Image: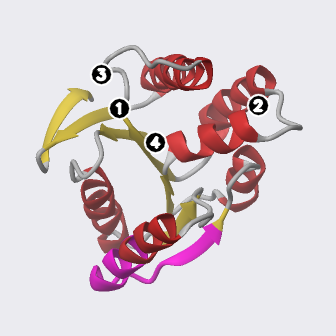
Amino acid sequence: MIHFVLGGARSGKSRHALAQAAKRVALGDDCLFVATAEAFDEEMASRIQRHQQERTEDDLPWRTLECPLNLSDCLTEHARHHQVILVDCLTLWLTNQLLSKNSDWPQIKSEFLATLSQLPGTIILVSNEVGGGLVAADPLSRQFVDEAGWLHQAIAAIADEVVLVTAGLPMTLKG
């Protein structure tokens, strides 16, 4: 089962995803949090700490893995029946890929989509919806927005449920 949660910055998407995971845990599933962020500066370190605190407040038995690049391998290794894996967030993972000197993004994206379709258990994917703004001024930002949009469309096509969260309000787009 693939749940895809989209929203803007501070939209409530991560909190919604945590609530969805909590429902699975109430049914007896184990839970694994896969974090894609890397703390390269104080502001990002603060964001990561805030998300860690949110998970602690939810009182769920989270195991956490840091996975900034090899997401397909991580999911393949850890997904199993009666487990929920929450990945937060795909746009940070995409950024890591686009900035990595050794990344073959088209191949990695293809492998990721194929992997998602094969995984047992419940997978909750969180990502930033970035396509609602202006066209970016620089080439890397334009590439990021394009690739995020194409990735989101591909995931939405295979996801069982797609939810857009705005102002803390989840709106079901699919499922």
Quarter of the image with the C terminus is: top left
**Mark positioned earlier in the residue sequence (3 or 4):** 4
User: Where on the picture, by quarter, is residue 38?
Assistant: bottom right
Looking at the rendered structure, the number of numbered marks drawn on it comes to 4
Q: Which label belongs to residue 133?
A: 3
Q: Nearer the viewer, mark 4 or mark 1?
A: 1
Q: Nearer the viewer, mark 3 or mark 4?
A: 3
- How far is mark 1 from mark 3, CA to CA? 10 Å
**Residue 57 in the image: x percent, y percent?**
28, 84
Residue 64 lies in the magenta stretch: yes
- How far is mark 3 from mark 2, CA to CA? 26 Å
Q: Which residue is mark 4?
A: 1
Q: Which residues are magenta?
A: 51-65
Residue 139 drawn above or below residue 173? above
**Element at label 4:** loop
- How far is mark 4 from mark 2, CA to CA? 21 Å
Determine crowd level at label 3: few under 14, some 14-19, many 20+ residues with C-alpha closer than 10 A: few
**Residue 157 in the image: x percent, y percent?**
45, 18
Q: Nearer the viewer, mark 1 or mark 3?
A: 3
Q: Nearer the viewer, mark 2 or mark 1?
A: 1
What's the residue at 28%, 79% (across, down)?
58
Q: Which label belongs to residue 129?
A: 1
As shown in the figure, which amino acid type bears the numbered disc 1? Glu
Q: Nearer the viewer, residue 141 or 96?
A: 141
Q: Nearer the viewer, residue 21 or 46?
A: 46
Q: Which residue is mark 2?
A: 108
**Element at label 3:** loop
Q: Nearer the viewer, mark 4 or mark 2?
A: 2
- How far is mark 4 from mark 1, CA to CA? 21 Å
**Mark positioned earlier in the residue sequence (3 or 2):** 2
